[in-house]
Structures are given as structure tokens and as C-alpha cells.
Image (cartoon, grey):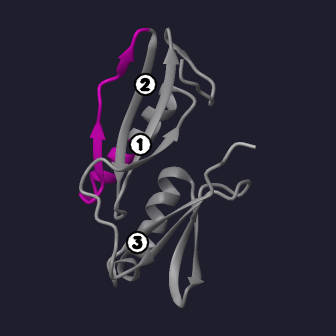
Amino acid sequence: MPLRFNHMELTLPPGQLTETREEISEFYGHMFGWATSDVTILGQSGLLIRTDEATSQFILVTEQRDHIDSPGYDHLGLLCDTRAEVDGYLTVAKARQTVDDRVEIKEYDDLVNRDHVTHAFYVRFLLPIWFDLQCFERAGKPQPDRWAFT
């Protein structure tokens, strides 16, 4: 059986989650439709961000003295079905950025490799990694949500 993504834990400096918990919940709920809940884990209050109700995929955010610092391009890739879906998320991110300059966006030209095209952008808000929203196209047509190296 192939391995599946279950969760990712992200650590913030002490106090940062406490200060921004509601903003994180609101942004990622509005941006991606993710639900959040407070959880107690290892004696502290964490934030559980669920990608959907049907799977066990989630991001757990906690506070740690030794926390992640990711100034580069570290990211979690999110696969969309179509170019229009990617562009819709970009529109939402840009609208939020107009009222909150902590929303960071990196836009990219399409990555073309022969007849394979990757259309993507990165977004980040109050968490230490980027989220890479992308779709794959082949000869201008959307590709299924599976891929293989050829």
C-alpha cells in the first residue's frame, strides 16, 4: 500500500500562535475552506488545521522554543484540477493582501516542459512555510490528480 500524507507539524515561537490563532484560522478557512480547532497536545494548546472532513490530512501548529525558521522556498504543494481554480485562489489571496500586507504572494510564469505545463503561485500568511497552488496541463488540457515520472 502506498504511503499517504497524514500531517505536518509547524512550530512557531512562544507566544506567536497565541497572538495570531484567530487570524490564522480565519485566513486559511477563507482561503482554502480548511477548518481549525484547538487541541491540547503534550501539555500545550495547539491549532489543528484540517484540509477536509473526509481524510485524516491536517497541519498541526504549536509553539516551541526551538521553532522552524524557513526563509527560503520551503512549501507544501496543493494540487488544483484546473488553471481557473489556481487563478481563483490567487484572486482571493490578492484581495486579502490589499487589506493585510502580511499576506505574501509569489507569482510565477508557467513552467513549460515540452507539452507539460505547470501553472502555479505561492502564498503565505503567518505560518513559516509557503503553500504552492498549482495545476498540471498537457497540451493545454487539465491533467488528472495523479502524476508519474516519465
Residue 136 percent across, percent down from the top left: 50, 24
Q: Nearer the viewer, residue 21 or 136?
A: 136
Query: For numbered disc 3, what is the local secondary structure?
Result: strand
Asked if the residue at tag 2 contacts the one at tag 1, i.e. Cβ–Cβ closer than 8 Å, the answer is no
Q: Nearer the viewer, residue 81 or 75?
A: 75
Measured in 3D between alpha carbons, the distance from the residue under mark 3 to the one under mark 2, in whole angstroms, is: 30 Å
What number is the disc on residue 118? 2
Q: Mark 1 or mark 3, which is nearer to you?
A: 3
Q: Which residues are magenta?
A: 91-114
The residue positioned farthest toward the front in the image shown: 1
- Check the picture and name the quadrant holding the C terminus: top right
Measured in 3D between alpha carbons, the distance from the residue under mark 1 to the one under mark 2, in whole angstroms, is: 11 Å
What number is the disc on residue 132? 1
Q: Which amino acid is tagged 3?
A: Thr
What number is the disc on residue 1? none
Measured in 3D between alpha carbons, the distance from the residue under mark 1 to the one under mark 3, in whole angstroms, is: 19 Å
